[in-house]
Image (cartoon, grey):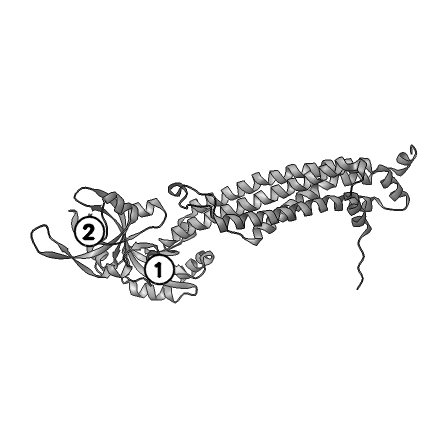
Amino acid sequence: MRTTMRYELFIGLRYLRAKRREAFISLITLISTLGIAIGVMTLDITLAVMTGFEEDLRDRILGFNAHVSIWSYLGPLEPYDEVTAKVRAVPGVASAEPFVYGQLMLSTPAHFAGVLVRGVQPTAAANPDLAGRLRTGSVEQLDRQFAVPLGEGRGATVQLPGIIIGAELARRLKVQVGDAVSVASAAGASTVPRIRSFVVVGEFESGMPDYDAGLAYLSLADAQRLYEMGESVTGVEVKVSDLYRADAIARDIGAALGSGYRVRDWKEANANLFSALALQKSVYFIVLLLIILVAAFTVLATLIMVVMEKRKDIAILKSMGMTRAAIARVFIFKGLIIGALGTLLGNLGGYAGCWLLERYQFIELPKDVFFVSTVPVTIYPEYFAAVTAAALAICLLATLYPARQAARLAPVDILRYE
């Protein structure tokens, strides 16, 4: 099947090829194309990096927090087996486990620190994220008793339960795996702090200093005894199969449990943080879009100069029967060709830049500030598509004024003086 090119597009392509006396216009055209390419490339890389930071932070937060959390409005959750069974039956729920949550003072003879403690089921299957972040030890050791010497020269030992703490907390307390620590808790019916001893059986490193310095894990049974909770728990933490449907799954869980329960998904729990990140990304998008807007002004200037240079050609084309709309389309096509070429080069450069950042990680960051040692990059095709659409729309708007001016030229006035 034979296809033909629109004659307006053909003329627009011809106008891209410079004659010797139009070399300056061609130089401006090249600058316009490169300006659009640089703007698109910068915007692509910035969005990929911002998305990488956002998803890395989200994964770190959700690695130590539930996708959906469930509490009872009446206090401790009891009996929790029935609630857990109902939650696991909701479509989209990957796992549901009871937990105990509280505060305590963790101390050694020379140091102390206030921490948040989580009582969890002592299995790696119930805590895969914690198991994956452990530097030493294992989650299963929380369910064991360990013999610790009572003191030098005594020769006697005492059986102590295990505790897992963050690497930064271990550094501050100057303890390591196998050392005993004391915990003091004022929860429960008694107003007198209860002091118990535990042995450090593992250290985790989340990459977030606040978690590594202020979080500890006990077995569920030990945490219940420590806080005198009997068979009750603080709540149930849920992992879902699709993070982005956590809000919908949370609503389904709430409907399944009925009234009396507080069900909150990770988006709601971290709404302020992720709203700020989304706003920051939007601001970067708008600011960097100005680079493309500046390049579009050079496209506008280029087309105006072409219109002035091609006045005689336009007059002849109109005399041969070419309509005003067709004349306008010639310059619209020319501007869109410049924009499309610049956008294509920018997308290729942006993808190459993202690939290099992801592959070679040659930009190092202070880990205690950014939680990561190198720049994280996440590429989404829809972001490239959005940048492409925005760049082409700006270029299209830049062509309208010179196209309108070319269409309004009167052939009689031009040819009279030729």
**Outermost residue toward the left?**
154
Quadrant in the picture for the C terminus: top right
The residue indicated by pointer 1 is 128
Identity of the amino acid at label 2? Asp
Q: Residue at x 54, y 53 (%)?
A: 380
Q: Decide if residue 246 is on the left or right side of residue 414.
A: left
Residue 379 on image: x %, y %: 53, 52
Check the image and report above or below for 311 versus 228.
Answer: above
Residue situated in front as seen by the camera: 143 or 117:
143
Residue 179 tag number: 2
Check the image and report above or below for 120 versus 176.
Answer: below
- Please tell me how crowded label 1 is: few (under 14), some (14-19), or many (20+) other residues with Cα within 10 Å: few
Q: Residue at x 18, y 41 (%)?
A: 110
Residue 172 on image: x %, y %: 26, 43
Residue situated in front as seen by the camera: 297 or 277:
297
Q: Secondary structure at mark 1?
A: helix
Q: Earlier in the sequence, mark 1 or mark 2?
A: 1
Q: Decide if residue 367 is on the left or right side of residue 355.
A: left
Residue 199 on image: x %, y %: 20, 53
Q: Secondary structure at mark 2?
A: loop
Residue situated in front as seen by the camera: 402 or 156:
156
Residue situated in front as seen by the camera: 160 or 18:
18
